[in-house]
């Protein structure tokens, strides 16, 4: 059985391959802009960022029931630390949060991984143009319509 594992930081991704439990390749350097190999049967991992815990929990439960692995963060800086450590398929972030807002998180995340899919959820439309300029892939309006959220995530992540 062949299994690929990966770790990424702000400079590069390091991966190794296990075949029948034995390590075949250690510390292969892969530029961060390049997508990592993910096994076909591995669930895409999503990070939801919102300062409203109820919204995070609700969206997490919904997306997990639709076949995604989901992590949550309640602050921008907390999300940024997770993005450094984990190779997420996509980030779903609110714009207006205390401390680091969604636009600042988007900018910093895109500096780490230009190919990262970043979905903005917002009730205010005045920052959409700036978010697009920095590489937001899509917008989900608040209050979130779950079918729209699922469609947007599947369209972008499961290409």
Image: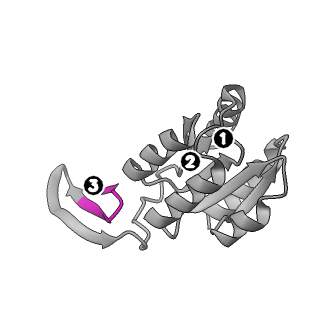
Residue at 61% across, 38% down: 64
| Element type where label 2 sits in the image | strand
Query: How far apart, in angstroms, are the residues tagged by discs 1 and 2?
Result: 9 Å
Dot 1 and dot 2 residues touching (CB under 8 Å): yes
* Residue that mark 3 sits on: 1
Q: Is residue 43 left or right of residue 13?
A: right
Q: Quadrant of the C terminus?
A: bottom right
Front residue (pair 95, 36) = 95
Front disc: 3 or 1: 1
* Residue that mark 2 sits on: 46
| Element type where label 1 sits in the image | helix
Bounds of the magenta segment:
6-16
Dot 2 or dot 3, earlier in sequence: 3
Query: How far apart, in angstroms, are the residues tagged by discs 2 and 3?
Result: 26 Å
Front residue (pair 18, 155) = 155
| Element type where label 3 sits in the image | loop
To which quarter of the image does residue 11 belong?
A: bottom left
**12 inside magenta stretch:** yes
Count the marks: 3
Front residue (pair 92, 97) = 97
Q: Position of residue 130 (x, y in %)?
A: 72, 66
**31 inside magenta stretch:** no
Residue at 61% across, 41% down: 49
* Residue that mark 1 sits on: 63
Does residue 68 appear in this view?
Answer: no
Front disc: 1 or 2: 2
Q: Is residue 38 left or right of residue 53?
A: left
């Amino acid at each position: 059985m062949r299994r690929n594992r990966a770790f990424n930081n702000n400079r590069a991704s390091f991966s190794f391959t296990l075949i029948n439990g034995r390590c075949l390749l250690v510390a292969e350097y892969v530029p961060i802009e390049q997508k990592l190999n993910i096994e076909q049967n591995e669930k895409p991992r999503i990070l939801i960022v919102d300062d409203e815990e109820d919204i995070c929990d609700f969206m997490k439960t919904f997306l997990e029931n639709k076949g995604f692995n989901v992590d949550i963060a309640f602050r921008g800086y907390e999300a940024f630390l997770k993005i450094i450590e984990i190779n997420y398929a996509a980030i779903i972030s609110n714009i207006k949060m205390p401390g680091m807002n969604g636009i600042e998180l988007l900018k910093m995340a895109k500096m780490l991984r230009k190919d990262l899919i970043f979905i903005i959820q917002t009730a205010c439309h005045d920052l959409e143009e700036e978010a697009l300029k920095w590489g937001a892939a899509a917008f989900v309006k608040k209050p979130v319509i779950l079918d729209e959220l699922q469609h947007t995530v599947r369209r972008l992540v499961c290409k």
